[in-house]
Each structure stands twice: as structure tokens, then as C-alpha cells.
């Protein structure tokens, strides 16, 4: 099966990202704080709270905020309609929108934009929001904003700074706020994938200084940022490394002030000399492709779901970091139901019995991006499946080839990341393996109607009683269909020079640099 032109564009860009398969960030966390000290590292110098910070990363980037919600650098260039705190709560903080009013019937919201300027000097306007919503409604350009914006019918510019957004049906406030949190302000005349691929166009705390792909990215303080006096830093430099070992070596030599998004295996080595902080994370899931035998057999999928040893994976691969999950909800989600970890958790005997009942073939190949922790996860799953009589072959691939196969629905199964659904369980349907339509890479045009209905109900339930029932049904359907089996949360890990303070990650897994000092 060949991929569509839309997917080809997505693959070419996504292949640049070391973030793999997730679509959006993850569990909110507290600010990344450490004790102040003098320090003589790469970012020292200048008055307290000013100067330069140098961070190392293995993540290569692009500048389109519609394309990915996992890019660690991109947030600094953009202002979103609202922000969420970094303490794990979802109390909206005015950002691009200085105020908003949700209609009593939950059928519209009226936004008043903050008086602000883009980095180009042009004023932020209501027309930009209207154009952005139209892009989010276009299947060919919406990318990760498609599902969060699916409840929107129309958007109208009331005046230069006021936008009325009308919904298709009554919509829960939490879903509206999650959309506002995900929605970036971009000038209407620059809001295309082609224009944003190589140059940002935002009004965020930092402007683009210099970008040399695969080498370095510099961010310069935006003097017109809406939060007066911030950001504290005058400049942030990201240096790109080809592998984590080289990045960690640069941290230890003092070439960089911090190593962003490193593997858990480095924690023991660095913990005594650097501040190690767990940022917000994502989830990892075991996905089985229901369009390809033997995973077109639901009973077989249910059998293999019982053979996932989450505790062992967390201990051996995550070095004890992370929490077990069953379906694709984090523990902070209102839809998280810990009972499934007992009723549907690791049970080799139950798995073997279900496998015997299934009558399906007992062999499959798991695709995975080479050199990632997901390979180790699959090795543990492979060993446990062998014990119940199922042979799993692991086939690591170069990342671009892996993503192409995934998006073309050619992989039998894989372990991949899933974004944080924040406070809206219906946003479980953002990931390509979880979409409620024919673009779903694990069902294509045979997405179970019960799942489509459950996602819709979760996205429209207004009362606590209706929400409780909708979330329970969504969990039931996910457990019954058993194509997306939760394994664990996957927190991010940072190693920082001890004089660096105030670095934080938000629920999307973006690094937030507004309060950072070095």
C-alpha cells in the first residue's frame, strides 16, 4: 500500500523528529527547579536572570506548530490562546486570549485577544484566528490540530480583537479549554505548512536567531512579549547531537548547561553532579494492526493484551520511572480507571487460555524504530509471548522507513508513544493509531462503530453523570477491542547544571523557558 501525498509530507517532516510517534505532549509536571550557584558553564555570565543558556538535544526540529505537539523547541516561538500551569492542574491562564466567555448553552465561545505583535511587527488579529481554525478544519493541513478542533463549526471575526467560535453541538468546557491551549497564534498570510517548515511566525517569548539544521538553533528574547519583563534570558542556544552518549559527554565537559530529553539509563551516572528532573511525559502503548492477520482476530488481541508485564518494563527499561496504565489514559485523566490494571492486567495463564480459544496464527512481526527504548520494551513482550506460545519477531528499522510503514498501515504491531489527553478523554483520538475515521492506521475504514460512538459521547458529555458514563463506556470499548494496550507513562528526563532554575515543561511536553534563569 502506498502512502498518500498528505502522508508523504508528514513522513518527510516527522522523520526529522526524534520524538517518534506521539502527537502531543503529556502529563503536566512541576517546574524544573534547582539551587542557584555561581557556575562557570556554557551559559554563565551576565546579571542574575539574564545572559545565555545552552541546552543540548538529539531532537531535530521544524517550525510548524500544527505539525507536532511534541517538539521541545517550538513552543518558545508561539503564543497560544491560553496556557496551563506546570503543576499538573488545568486552570487556564490568559495568554493570546486575555479573556473568553463560554455561552450558557455550551454552543459557542467568544474570545478577546490580547493586544500584541508578532515577531515581524504586525499586530495579532481576529482574522489570524479565523484563518487558523480554517486550516485546522482542512484534513490536508490540520495535522495534530484536527481532532482538538473537530467540535468547531465556524469562526467569525467580530472586530479586530474579538472572535466568536461556534460549535457543532454543545461542548464540554474542558474540551474547549484544551483546544485553546493547543491553538497557536500565527499570521494568516504565513499559516501554511510550506511557509512554516523553515521559519517560525509567532509572537512567543523568543524570536528566531539562527538555525543551522543538525547543528544549532539560537533563540533571542522577544522584547515585545506580553508578559512584561520576561523571558529572563536574553538568549538560548540549542546544540544538536547525533546521539545521547555524545550529548551526555558534552554536559559532563561543561560544553552545555543542560541535556534535554535524555534516556533514563543516564540517571545513575549523572545524579550526583547535576540536577535530574522528570519533566512531563507521554505514554507508551502496544499497538496491534487489526487490518493484518493475526491481529484481525479480536480474541487473539485480547490474549496478547494479558501478556504485557508493565512492572517489569518500568523496572528494566524505565529504571523504575513511570506509572502503569491499561488504556490510553494517564493517571491524572478523568477517564483513568485503575481497576483495569487488575481485571485486565498481566496474567500469563489467562493470556494462554485466551490464545488457545482464539484459534489464530501464533506468529507476527513487530516494527520499531532502531535504537529507541521501544526496542527493549518489545524484547520483554517478546519473551513473555513466547511463554504462552506466540512467536514475535522484532524488526528494527531506520526511523523514516519505520514511520512510512506505520502511516501506510503496513506494520503488524509496534510499541509507540501516545500523547497526553489532558482533561478531555475524547482527545484520545488524536493519535494516528486512535483516530475515529478511515485515517486510523490500525483499522482504516473498519474502525469499530462502538469506538466512534464512545469518542463522540466523551466529547459531548456536559454533566458529571454523563461524563462518568461516557468515560466508562470508552474504557470498556478500548478493553474489548484491545488494539491499543497501555504500558506505562513515559516521563521526560533532564540533566541540568545546578545553577539553572525555573526550566519547566507544560502538558504538551514542551520546554517552557519564560521563567528560566542561568
Image (cartoon, rainbow, N blue to C red):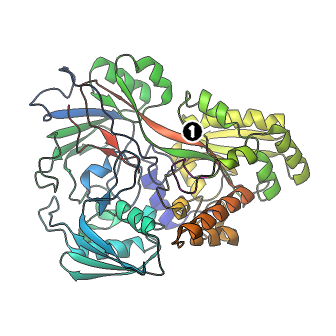
Q: Who is closer to the viewer here, 443 or 343?
A: 343
Where's residue 134, x and y in %?
A: 36, 76
Question: Is label 1 in a helix, a strand or a loop?
Answer: loop
From the viewer's perspective, is residue 83 above or below residue 260? below
- Residue 370 visible in rendering: no
Q: Is residue 271 above or below residue 7?
A: above
Q: Quadrant of the C terminus?
A: top left
Q: Position of residue 46 (x, y in %)?
A: 9, 30
- Left or right of residue 129, residue 228 in this image: left
Give whichever of 72, 281 is nearer the camera. Answer: 281
The boundaries of the magenta stretch are 328-335
Q: Quadrant of residue 216?
A: top left
Taking 374 as reference, is 183 above or below it?
A: below
Task: Find residue 391 and report its horizontal and vertical position in percent.
Answer: 80, 39
For label 1, the residue is 323
In the drawing, does residue 341 fall left or right of residue 374?
right
Q: What is the count of numbered marks? A: 1
Q: Position of residue 516 (x, y in %)?
A: 23, 38
| Residue 6 seen in render | yes
**Snapshot quadrant of residue 80:** bottom left
**Residue drawn where x is 70% and y is 62% of the image:** 477
Amino acid at each position: 500500500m502506498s502512502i498518500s501525498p498528505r502522508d508523504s509530507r508528514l513522513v518527510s517532516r516527522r522523520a526529522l523528529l526524534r520524538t517518534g510517534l506521539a502527537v502531543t505532549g503529556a502529563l503536566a509536571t512541576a517546574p524544573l527547579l534547582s539551587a542557584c550557584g555561581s557556575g562557570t558553564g556554557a551559559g554563565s555570565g551576565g546579571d542574575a536572570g539574564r545572559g545565555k543558556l545552552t541546552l543540548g538535544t538529539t531532537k531535530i526540529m521544524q517550525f510548524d506548530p500544527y505539525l507536532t505537539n511534541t517538539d521541545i523547541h517550538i513552543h518558545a516561538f508561539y503564543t497560544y490562546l491560553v496556557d496551563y500551569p506546570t503543576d499538573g492542574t488545568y486552570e487556564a491562564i490568559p495568554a493570546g486570549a486575555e479573556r473568553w466567555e463560554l455561552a450558557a448553552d455550551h454552543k459557542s465561545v467568544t474570545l478577546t485577544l490580547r493586544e500584541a505583535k508578532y515577531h515581524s511587527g504586525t499586530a495579532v488579529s481576529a482574522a489570524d484566528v479565523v484563518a487558523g481554525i480554517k486550516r485546522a478544519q482542512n484534513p490536508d493541513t490540520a495535522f495534530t490540530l484536527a481532532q482538538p478542533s473537530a467540535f468547531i463549526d465556524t469562526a467569525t471575526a467580530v472586530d479586530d480583537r474579538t472572535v466568536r467560535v461556534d460549535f457543532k453541538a454543545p461542548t464540554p468546557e474542558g474540551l474547549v479549554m484544551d483546544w485553546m491551549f493547543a491553538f497557536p497564534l500565527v499570521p494568516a498570510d504565513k499559516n501554511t505548512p510550506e511557509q512554516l517548515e523553515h521559519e517560525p511566525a509567532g509572537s512567543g517569548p523568543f524570536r528566531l536567531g539562527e538555525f543551522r539544521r543538525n547543528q544549532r538553533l539560537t533563540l533571542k528574547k522577544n522584547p515585545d512579549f506580553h508578559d512584561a519583563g520576561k523571558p529572563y534570558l536574553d538568549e538560548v542556544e540549542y546544540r544538536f547531537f547525533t546521539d545521547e552518549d555524545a550529548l551526555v559527554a558534552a554536559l559532563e565537559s561543561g560544553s552545555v548547561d543542560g541535556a534535554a530529553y535524555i534516556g533514563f539509563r543516564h540517571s545513575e551516572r549523572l545524579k550526583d553532579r547535576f540536577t535530574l528532573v522528570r519533566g512531563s511525559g507521554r505514554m507508551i502503548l502496544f499497538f496491534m494492526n487489526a487490518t493484518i492477520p493475526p491481529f484481525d482476530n479480536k480474541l487473539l488481541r485480547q490474549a496478547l493484551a494479558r501478556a504485557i508485564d508493565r512492572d517489569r518494563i518500568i523496572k528494566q527499561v524505565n529504571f523504575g520511572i513511570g506509572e502503569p496504565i491499561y488504556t490510553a489514559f494517564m493517571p491524572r485523566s478523568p477517564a483513568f480507571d485503575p481497576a483495569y490494571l487488575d481485571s485486565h492486567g498481566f496474567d500469563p495463564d489467562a493470556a494462554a487460555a485466551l490464545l488457545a480459544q482464539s484459534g489464530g496464527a501464533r506468529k507476527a512481526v513487530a516494527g520499531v524504530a532502531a535504537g529507541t527504548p521501544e526496542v527493549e520494551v518489545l524484547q520483554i513482550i517478546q519473551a513473555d509471548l513466547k511463554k504462552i506460545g506466540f512467536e514475535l519477531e522484532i524488526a528494527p528499522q531506520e526511523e523514516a522507513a519505520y514511520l512510512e510503514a506505520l502511516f501506510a498501515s503496513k506494520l503488524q504491531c509496534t510499541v509507540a508513544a501516545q500523547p497526553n489527553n489532558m482533561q478531555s478523554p475524547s482527545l484520545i483520538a488524536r493519535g494516528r493509531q486512535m483516530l475515529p475515521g478511515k485515517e486510523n492506521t490500525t483499522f482504516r475504514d473498519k474502525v469499530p462503530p462502538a469506538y466512534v460512538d464512545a469518542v463522540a459521547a466523551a466529547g459531548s458529555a456536559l454533566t458529571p453523570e454523563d461524563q462518568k458514563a461516557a468515560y466508562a463506556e470508552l474504557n470498556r470499548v478500548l478493553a474489548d477491542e484491545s488494539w491499543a494496550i497501555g504500558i506505562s507513562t513515559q516521563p521526560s528526563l533532564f540533566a541540568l547544571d545546578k545553577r539553572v532554575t525555573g526550566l519547566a515543561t507544560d502538558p504538551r511536553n514542551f520546554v517552557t523557558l519564560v521563567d528560566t534563569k542561568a
